[in-house]
Amino acid sequence: MKQFITHVTHYRYTAPVTYSIQTLRLTPRDDEHQRVLRWHIEAPGALEKQVDAYGNITHTLTLNHPHTDIELRVVGQVQVAPLARGLLGGEDSRLPVHAYCVQTPLTQADDTIMAFVREVLPDGLTTPDDILALANAISDRVAYEPGTTDVTTAASQVLTMGHGVCQDHAHLFLACVRGLGVPARYVSGYVHTTTEHSASHAWADVWLADIGWTSVDITNRQFASDSHCRLAVARDYDSASPVRGVRSGGGEESMEISVQVQTSGQQ
């Protein structure tokens, strides 16, 4: 599937910012499942390209002059190949697989989470069917409800509250899988969908020893497919967020995000 993606992020500040530095994970990388045909980031300054510890393409934007807003505009085309039941296989990674067994503050598996996952998967997680069963159980337990959580909401809070968005589904899924001792990683990216869920999306990959990485969209209760364009992978949202930065000054901050994902038939 050829995806045409437009992603605009606009920050506004109530007072001048004297210095800011932003890390952008807004560029998909080429692999055997997706090929970047065209990609451009428009920013109010020079971008320094790097590759992070997870193998993600990053750009650093540094502004050392007074400013009251920042607009980042991304336009691109990506060809995404179909996946058989979400199978990525032995995708190249800079980190060893078991680095993705490490819990984080956002994905810590407490007693309640462990009781939940053991009820869903009493025999553990060993097959793609187990992956999909857990995704369905999480979507049943945690209703999709925007505006009820934020980027600091941990998996244990999500399970208790029973509502959240795609990143919350992904964090709870990661806590469950890692709690069983199975490597799993957070994925940020875009999804082409006709459902209510936003085009900027989060899902997860699970490592199964016999077949490699399998990618699953917890929110949409399906394996990842050619509808999914991958931007970044990491242990959780903190290390895979599309834009993350620090600033000096600026007063209060507001942010507007607009994402459109279209296919060739919609052009």
Image (tube, helix red, strand yellow):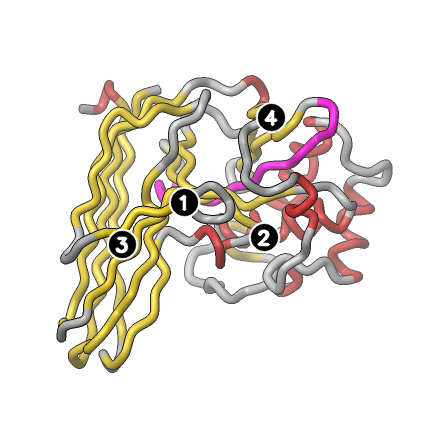
Residue 209 among those drawn in magenta: yes
- At numbered mark 3, what does the secondary structure look like: helix, strand or loop? strand
Disc 1 and disc 2 in contact, CB within 8 angstroms: no
- From the top left corner, tell me how far across and down residue 76 is, in percent: 23, 33
- At numbered mark 2, what does the secondary structure look like: helix, strand or loop? helix
- From the top left corner, tell me how far across and down residue 58 is, in percent: 36, 48
Disc 1 and disc 3 in contact, CB within 8 angstroms: no
- From the top left corner, tell me how far across and down residue 56 is, in percent: 43, 43
Please tell me which of labels 2 and 3 falls first in the chain.
Answer: 2
Amino acid type at circle 4 is Gly
The quarter of the picture where residue 40 lies is top left
Q: CA distance from mark 1 to mark 3?
A: 24 Å
The front one of 147 and 66 is: 66
Q: Is residue 198 above or below residue 103?
A: above
Q: Label 4: which residue?
A: 90
Q: CA distance from mark 2 to mark 3?
A: 22 Å
The residue shown at (79%, 39%) is 121
The residue shown at (21%, 44%) is 41
Determine crowd level at label 4: few under 14, some 14-19, many 20+ residues with C-alpha closer than 10 A: few
Numbered range of the magenta stretch = 196-210
Q: Is residue 134 left or right of residue 7?
A: right
Q: Identify the disc placed on residue 171.
A: 2
Residue 158 visible: no
Please tell me which of labels 4 and 2 falls first in the chain.
Answer: 4
Q: Label 1: which residue?
A: 51
Amino acid type at circle 3 is Ile
Residue 17 among those drawn in magenta: no
Determine crowd level at label 3: few under 14, some 14-19, many 20+ residues with C-alpha closer than 10 A: few
Q: Identify the disc placed on residue 9.
A: none
Q: Is residue 202 left or right of residue 88?
A: left
Q: Main secondary structure of the magenta part?
A: strand
Residue 55 visible: yes
